[in-house]
Amino acid sequence: MATDPDLAELIRFLAVSLVDKPDEVRVELVEERSANVYELEVAETDLGKVIGRGGKTARALRTVVQAIAPRSRKRTLVEILE
């Protein structure tokens, strides 16, 4: 089962694979009362690559994270910052 740092690293790995400027990819965990929110930040020019046409890439990224997120009372969310 994955731990939180592993999830952040997975999100970073997937995002780096999609973008043109991998050195500008940042993932930060923000723990809220009811959810663990992973904030993904990429270069402005790479935003479209991470979101994808109609949000398909972002949805796929969130699906992968949900599939391996540890089962707990808190929800696990991926937020793409603009």
Image: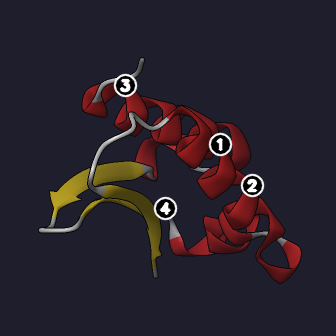
What's the residue at 27%, 52% (across, down)?
73
Q: Earlier in the sequence, mark 2 or mark 4?
A: 4
Q: Residue 14, how many percent across, how many down? A: 62, 38
What is the image's colouring? secondary structure
Q: How many angstroms separate mark 2 from mark 1 (CA)?
A: 6 Å
- Residue under label 2, please give it: 60
Within-10-Å neighbours for mark 2: few <14, some 14–19, many 20+: few
Q: How many angstroms separate mark 4 from mark 3 (CA)?
A: 19 Å
- Residue under label 3, please give it: 6
Query: Which quadrant of the figure contains the N terminus?
Result: top left
- Select label 4 or label 3 by which is in front: 3
Contact between marks 4 and 3 (CB within 8 A): the answer is no
What's the residue at 50%, 31% (across, down)?
10
Q: How many angstroms separate mark 4 from mark 1 (CA)?
A: 19 Å
- Residue under label 1, please give it: 64
Q: Residue 17, how many percent across, how many down? A: 68, 37
Q: Amino acid at mark 4?
A: Val
Q: Is residue 20 visible?
A: no
Residue 12 placement, left or right of 67: left
Residue 72, placed above or below residue 29: above
Q: Amino acid at mark 2?
A: Ala
What's the residue at 15%, 59% (across, down)?
31
Q: Earlier in the sequence, mark 3 or mark 1?
A: 3
- Residue under label 4, please give it: 42
Q: Is residue 15 visible?
A: yes
| Farthest front residue in view | 73
Residue 25, placed above or below residue 10: below
